[in-house]
Image (spheres, grey):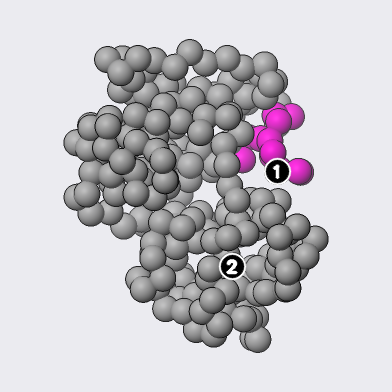
Amino acid sequence: MDLVEQLSRHGRQLMVSAVSAGLDAPVPSCPRWDVRRLVNHVTKVHHWALHIYGGGAPDDFTFAQPDDAELFSVYAAGLKSLATGLAVRPRTDQIWTYVPGASGAEFWPRRMAHETAMHRVDAELAAGLGVNDFDPEFAADGLDELLVAIAPARFNTSRVDRPFRVTFTPLDSNRAWTISVAPGSVSTEPVARDGSDLTVFADASLLYRWAWNRVPDDEVSLVGEVTVADRWRQHLTVGSRTDAE
């Protein structure tokens, strides 16, 4: 799977939907956001990632928000530059990431592909023309990234009052994950475990979107304690590292 090609594809689709929706359109999946803010956010993230991938320090980055007339052209140029830059393996793998132990050369193409893909969904929801499915392999990789690399560090465990366990099972992929959340700790295993409080079944594309809170519960199959789905949404907090929100 070519993650840089996935980045470019979803990035182009995001722009098409954003143009169709218009900058003032609300983004249903991102409360208090309009399309203007969505495109500005993704544009800034793309520039920030390319800065880091090129060896820059994460805190040594500036970005001038473009005005409305230039926003889409700046976005398109940034997407192209990012894809071009990520296609070349850096001279050293000693690139900063916010996942301990991750190789920068592998982390950033994957992170930017999935960041852009999920915000493509946001743009499609804003346009109101339906959401295109993800390729099952890409969606399964997105689930793996979220559940193994991102979620364990992004749960607000200080608000978890009792342990719970969720198993994610894509129906069109020979993969599964079980994430265990408790006060002060989170861990993920790349297997389906019996006895989970909740098991979520769906095709990988829907399950990927559900895990990122872009699909309502009635579009997937919930088996077990369905109120745990609310706990998942309450405790998983994923924000921007660029302060772009």
Q: Which residues are magenta?
A: 94-107
Using residue 58 as the reference point, say whether residue 51 is left or right of it: left
In the figure, residue 50 lies in which quadrant?
top right
Residue 44 location (% of width, % of height) = 48, 25
Q: Predominant secondary structure in magenta? A: loop
The residue positioned 41% from the left and 70% from the top of the image is 217
- Name the one closer to the observer, 119 or 110: 119
- Inspect the image, locate mark 1, and give the three-letter code of the amino acid beneath it: Val
Question: Which residue does the image show at 37% across and 23% down from the upper left?
Answer: 75
Q: Is residue 105 magenta?
A: yes
The answer to whether residue 8 is seen in the rendering is: no
The answer to whether any part of residue 34 appears in the image is yes
Disc 1 from disc 2: Cα separation: 24 Å
Residue 83 on image: x %, y %: 44, 29
Q: Which residue is mark 2?
A: 231
- Mark 1 highlights which residue? 99
Let me know if residue 197 is in the magenta part. no
Q: Amino acid under label 2? A: Arg
Q: Is residue 44 left or right of residue 37?
A: right
Label 2 Cα crowd, 10 Å radius (few <14 / some 14-19 / many 20+): few
- Identify which residue is drawn at 70% across, 51% down: 153
Whether residue 150 is situated above or below residue 191 in the rendered picture: above
Ranked by sequence position, the earlier of labels 1 and 2 is 1
In percent of width and height, residue 88 lies at 53, 27
The answer to whether 127 is drawn above or below residue 194 in the figure is: above
* Viewer-proximal residue among 97 and 240: 240
At 72% across and 73% down in the image, what residue appears?
Answer: 163
